[in-house]
Image (spheres, helix red, strand yellow):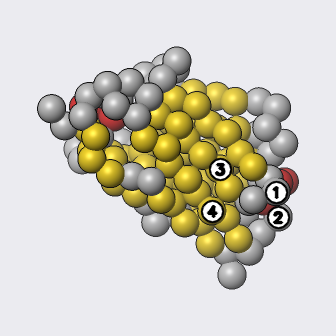
């Protein structure tokens, strides 16, 4: 059974940091591209960060470049999102996603974790 379980969300003040984790099981994690998305109320879902299967290539949304870092531990089947210098506009539900081609067949999602940045 495929599972992606996010953790690490919470409440934080502006300028603070959080580290999200996503524990994967039920599929060959190391062969999957891993991504973090977020969805804020009234906004479209946004790709925050992505990391290729063996960690060679990363991508970030412009809004988080220089503040967020995605990483993975293939031995632990876990992907992380280190979030620094958090801003109120980072408030959203953050989702972990794993995928490989063909994407229609191999595209998995976690249940999400809430991140709230308040002043």
**Image location (x, y in percent) of residue 95:** 48, 53
Nearest-to-viewer mark from 2 and 4: 4
Relative image position of residue 42 (x, y in whole percent): 23, 44
Q: Residue at x 74, y 74 (%)?
A: 26
| Coordinates of residue 23 in the picture (x, y in percent) | 63, 62
According to the picture, the residue beneath numbered tag 1 turns out to be 75
104 sits to left or right of 100: left
Label ID, residue 79: 3
Return the mark for residue 28.
2
For the residues labelled 1 and 2, the Cα–Cα distance comes to 11 Å
Percent coordinates x, y for residue 99 in the rendering = 70, 54
Residue 118, quarter of the rendered image: top left
Q: Quadrant of the C terminus?
A: top left
- Name the residue rendered at 40%, 34% in the picture: 17
Q: Dot 3, crowdedness within 10 Å: few (<14), some or many (≥20)?
A: many
* Residue 104 shows in this picture: no
Answer with mark 2 or mark 4, whichever residue precedes in sequence. Answer: 4
C-alpha span from label 2 to label 4 = 12 Å
Task: Give me the C-alpha separation between circle 2 and circle 3.
Answer: 13 Å
């Amino acid at each position: 059974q495929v599972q992606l379980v996010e953790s690490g969300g919470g409440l934080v003040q502006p300028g603070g940091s959080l580290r999200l984790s996503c524990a994967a099981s039920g599929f060959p994690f190391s062969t999957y591209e891993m991504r973090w998305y977020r969805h804020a109320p009234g906004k479209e879902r946004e790709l925050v960060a992505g990391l290729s299967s063996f960690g060679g290539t990363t991508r970030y949304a412009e809004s988080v470049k220089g503040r967020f870092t995605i990483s993975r531990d293939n031995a632990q089947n876990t992907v992380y999102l280190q979030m620094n210098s958090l801003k109120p506009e980072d408030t959203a539900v953050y989702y972990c996603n794993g995928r490989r081609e063909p994407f229609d067949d191999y595209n998995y999602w976690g249940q999400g974790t809430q991140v709230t940045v308040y002043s």
